[in-house]
Image (spheres, helix red, strand yellow):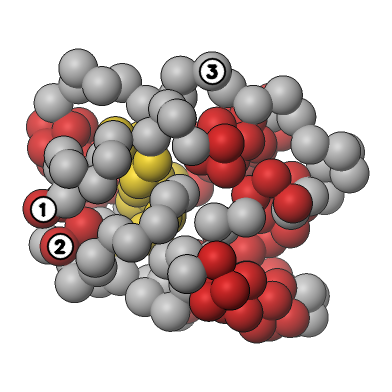
Amino acid sequence: MRRLSSVVLVASLCVAGTGAAFAVGIAAPTDLPAQQPAPVAHPYDTTADAHAQVDAAFADAKRTGRDVLIDFGANWCPDCRMLAGVFDMPQVKAWKDSNFASVSVNVDRFNVNMDIPARYGVKVKSIPTVLILTPDGKLLNADGTLALGNARTMSPAAAVDLIASWEQRKG
């Protein structure tokens, strides 16, 4: 599965790296450091009502016109914790909050909240899995849901550029 994730990641980064994808729509922050931030120890609330959180994110997205970003992961996952560290960087957090209604959903050992990605035709096979959806629930990155699976090896800019390229698809 890691090999498939790597292939999807490389293909996605080739598309994201063209620069042309960012001429319209949301622009990713350009002032990100090359080095990885510190991973977040416990980015997924294991006691939260994930269904209510996702419903609230969609209600917020409909009200504000932003898209929805759902990050599926678990606290034991090093790539999930690293991606959470990228999302917590001040520049990324400001960009993400202005462009997405976002929610992190705990899937533990693929045994909780698995019905949430299934709503959008996605089976979570590895984590982190990130879905970018329009306010009406259209999945924008069906071909790239696993692309952030190697977050530990990606620069913060590569991760953010990839997410920005997915958001561009709603055009």
Report x, y in % for residue 40: 57, 22
User: Image check: 137 left or right of 78?
Assistant: left
Q: Amino acid at mark 2?
A: Ala
Which callout, 3 or 2, points to the residue nearer the camera? 3
Locate residue 56: give its quadrant. top left
Q: Tell me the SS state at disc 1.
A: helix
Residue 128: x and y, percent? 45, 49
- Determine whether 28 is above or below 104 in the image: below
The residue at which mark 1 appears reads as 115
- Of 79 and 28, nearer the camera is 79
Q: CA distance from mark 3 to mark 2?
A: 27 Å
Residue 70: x percent and y percent? 35, 47
* Residue located 57% across and 43% down the image: 79
The answer to whether any part of residue 165 appears in the image is no
Q: Residues within 10 Å of mark 1 (few under 14, many from 20)?
A: some
Q: Which residue is mark 2?
A: 118
* CA–CA distance in space, label 1 to label 3: 25 Å
Q: Position of residue 92 (x, y in %)?
A: 65, 37
Q: Say which label, 3 or 2, has the lower sequence index.
A: 3
Rendered image quadrant of residue 46: top left
The residue under label 1 is which amino acid type?
Asp
Q: Which residue is mark 3?
A: 41
| Labelled pair 1, 3 in contact (Cβ < 8 Å) | no
Q: Give the left or right position of residue 20, taking residue 100 as reference.
A: right
Q: Are marks 2 and 1 in contact (CB under 8 Å)?
A: yes
Position of 122 relative to 152 (above/below): below
